[in-house]
Amino acid sequence: MIIDSHLHISYLKKQKTFTTIKRDLLNLMTKNKVDYAIVIPDNVPNPQCADLDELSKLVKNEKKLFMIATLAITKINKSNLARIDTMFKEKEAIGFKIFPGHDPIYPTDKRWLPIILLCQKYKLPFIIHTGVNSGHPEVAKYNDPKYIRDLALKFPKLKIIIAHYFWPKLDYCFEMTEGLPNVYFDTSALADPEVIKDSGGIKKIKDILVKTIKRRQDSIIYGTDWPICSFEKHINLIKALPISNELKKDIFFRNSLKLFPIKK
């Protein structure tokens, strides 16, 4: 089994409808033997990437697709919190993602507190975008793992997923998350050529993943960041790791099943 824990319904250069992209996604999942995918919406209306409203309609009757919730921090209010609560309760959404770096906000911003409490209430992951954005390394100041460490220590029952491993500073991210049993990592974008090059090469990527899963067996979940990144390259990355097949199964699906209520 393979569960892709991090992708989007979006297009890159050639404009497509979201329905067409969803069909492309399902076809690619079949081709690459991916059983389930967890789709992340944009936190603002975006004609290029499905937002929460669009995505809710797109995945509703798809047995292989699950959804993460998100909100811009400025949209956290009583009405939207009630909606997220209902989505969590009904398992319409199975986690929440924030985008520090894309947005000029920090994971430790106090305005996230009601979302964090909802994630804790329903035992759902709080996913944090990390690392640089292409051509904009300065944005990484917003998602520095030192803030994630503070958050993890303050809320030890909160399951936190670090997306993109704070590339290109993988070693720093590994060191800053030492001793945090509630912090997890997805592999999204780690097989992307730009990420590999800027992070020190494919050996560095493999080494950090091996160190991480050997430090704590349940700490890595498989993700791609499709359509920006390739299904095949990410699958091949995990298959090429010098670890046991059992640990590879942990990455591909077992650890995701522990974090997300994937049942339809």
Image (cartoon, rainbow, N blue to C red):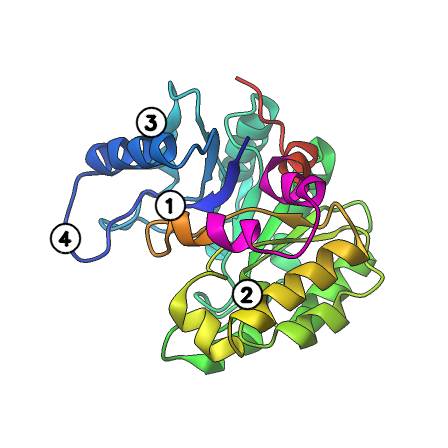
| Mark linked to residue 82 | none
The residue labelled by disc 2 is: 130
Left or right of residue 67, residue 46 in this image: left
Q: Position of residue 249 (x, y in %)?
A: 64, 38
Q: Secondary structure at mark 1?
A: loop
Determine crowd level at label 3: few under 14, some 14-19, many 20+ residues with C-alpha closer than 10 A: few
Q: Along the line of sight, which residue is nearer the eye, 56 or 145? A: 145
Q: Residue furthest bottom?
A: 138
Residue sitting at x 77%, y 50%: 182
Which residue shows up at 47% across the image and 29% down it?
A: 35
Q: Are marks 1 and 3 in contact (CB under 8 Å)?
A: no
User: Mark 2 or mark 4, which is nearer the start of the sequence?
Assistant: 4
Asked which secondary structure carries label 3, the reply is helix
Mark 2: which secondary structure?
A: loop
- Neighbours of disc 2 within 10 Å: few (<14), some (14-19), many (20+): many
Name which residue lies at 47% across and 56% down: 74
